[in-house]
């Protein structure tokens, strides 16, 4: 049995760019996969290929989901790894969207399947999206880092003021796929967003909006992101109002803001001291990750009100249990 199922095997695409995200370790607060879901909902792409899940998952860890259909019939949904195509006639390249779940097994075989689909559709470039948990406040702009496998892509990242991370350590499937693309001579870049660790239990629309904004600029997609950016502003405002009601939470967020400001001031001083020295280059692939592990799926994006209710519950639990331990290396790849 083939591990790859093609649905539009002979579909002709024009130098397609593949934009990818996986649920799991690389997807803090569901931010990266929600960005792909946004694009799926916006474009309504055609499913062109899928990697079968049987060989790659421990189903007691990544379980299939049962859903009710028409009030009675139950539908079983297995972890999916789907590739969908969308034509952009006004541009020179089409788009393939990949939405998947990080596997537990046979990473090298999984990676070969991913590359085979890229080769089959003659993918010209791969953009990988990820998100990590970090000690950052929700009130500041979302930090975005990135890396690339080619000097040309690296320069495009620099033009957007996206800097490389200096992280070295354990990586997730995003890091593995980027390295595999490099070895296969497929230009690839990864964009990583940092999500506040104390909001990790809910899809973070502000982080998703930041990823989409940078993808939009990097690929010149000309997407109208006004709605999701407005949702991000409202989300931040309501989180700020929630935090303001809790003195301990307010004090904690202020400390995070002060730490970030101190780091920014220190970096500015270093830049002033080194401005006459030639810049160092760092083109090595880097990865960032989180420890969430949820099946991916399409469907309507969550409303801001649903997100806020989730955050209220999260803040209540944190008041009872204390803040999570964020010193684990696997939660701070970046």
Image (tube, grey):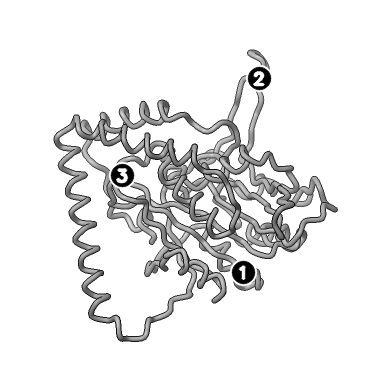
Cα distance in 3D space between marks 2 and 1:
42 Å
Q: Which one is nearer the viewer's eye here, 182 or 97?
A: 97
Crowd tier of the residue under label 1, counting other residues whose Cα lies within 10 Å: few below 14, some 14–19, many 20 or above? many
Q: Which residue sits at x=81%, y=47%?
A: 8
Q: Is residue 264 above or below residue 140?
A: below
Does residue 54 lie above or below 152 as drawn?
above
Residue designated by label 1: 187
Which class describes the residues within 10 Å of circle 2: few (<14), some (14-19), or many (20+)?
few
Mark 3 or mark 1, earlier in chain: 3
Question: Marks 3 and 1, Cα distance to the nearest angstrom?
Answer: 33 Å
Is 112 situated left or right of 177 in this image?
right
Distance between the Cα atoms at labels 3 and 2? Answer: 37 Å
Q: Nearer the viewer, residue 259 or 286?
A: 259
Q: Nearer the viewer, mark 3 or mark 2?
A: 3
Q: Say which residue label 2 marks.
A: 69
Q: Mark 3: few, some, or many residues within 10 Å (few <14, many ≥20)?
A: many
Q: Position of residue 279 (x, y in %)?
A: 37, 81
- Place of residue 284 in the rendered image (x, y in percent of width and height, measured from the top left): 48, 74
Q: Residue furthest top?
A: 71
Taking 220 as reference, is 138 above or below it? above
Q: Residue at x 45, y 57 (%)?
A: 192
Of callouts 2 and 1, the N-terminal one: 2
Relative to 327, 34 lies left or right: right
Q: Is residue 23 left or right of residue 89?
A: left
In the rendered image, which quarter is residue 328 located in? bottom left
In this rendered view, identify the residue nearer to me: 298 or 270: 270
Residue assigned mark 3 = 138
Q: Quadrant of the C terminus?
A: bottom left
Q: In the image, residue 306 lies at what x, y percent?
A: 42, 27
Dot 3 or dot 2: first in sequence order is: 2
Residue 23 lies, in percent from the top left, at: 52, 46
């Amino acid at each position: 049995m083939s591990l790859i199922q093609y649905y539009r095997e002979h579909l002709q695409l024009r130098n397609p760019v593949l934009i990818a995200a996986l649920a799991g370790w690389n997807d803090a607060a569901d931010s990266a996969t929600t960005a792909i879901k946004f694009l799926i909902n916006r474009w309504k792409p055609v499913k062109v290929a899928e990697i079968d899940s049987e060989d790659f998952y421990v189903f007691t860890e990544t379980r299939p989901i049962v859903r009710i259909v028409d009030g009675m019939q139950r539908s079983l949904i297995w972890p999916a790894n789907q590739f969908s195509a969308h034509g952009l006639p006004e541009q020179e390249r089409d788009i393939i969207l990949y939405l998947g779940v990080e596997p537990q097994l046979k990473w090298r075989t999984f990676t070969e399947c991913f590359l085979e689909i890229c080769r089959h559709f003659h993918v010209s470039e791969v953009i990988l999206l990820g998100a990590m948990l970090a000690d950052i406040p929700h009130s500041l702009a979302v930090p975005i880092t990135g890396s690339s496998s080619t000097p040309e892509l690296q320069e495009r990242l620099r033009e957007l003021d996206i800097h490389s991370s200096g992280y070295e350590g354990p990586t997730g499937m995003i890091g593995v796929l980027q390295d595999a693309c490099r070895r296969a001579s497929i230009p690839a870049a990864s964009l990583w967003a940092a999500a506040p660790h104390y909001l990790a239990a809910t899809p973070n629309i502000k982080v998703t909006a930041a990823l989409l904004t940078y993808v939009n600029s990097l690929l010149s997609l000309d997407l109208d992101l006004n709605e999701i950016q407005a949702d991000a502003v409202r989300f931040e405002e309501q989180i700020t109002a929630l935090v303001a009601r809790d003195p301990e939470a307010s004090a904690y967020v202020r400390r995070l803001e002060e730490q970030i400001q101190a780091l920014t001031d220190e970096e500015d001083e270093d830049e002033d001291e080194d401005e006459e020295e030639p810049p160092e280059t760092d083109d090595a692939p880097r990865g960032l990750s989180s420890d969430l592990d949820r099946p991916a799926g399409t469907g309507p994006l969550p409303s801001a009100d649903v997100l806020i209710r989730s955050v209220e519950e999260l803040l209540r639990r944190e008041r009872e249990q204390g803040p999570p331990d964020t010193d684990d290396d696997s939660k701070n790849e970046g």
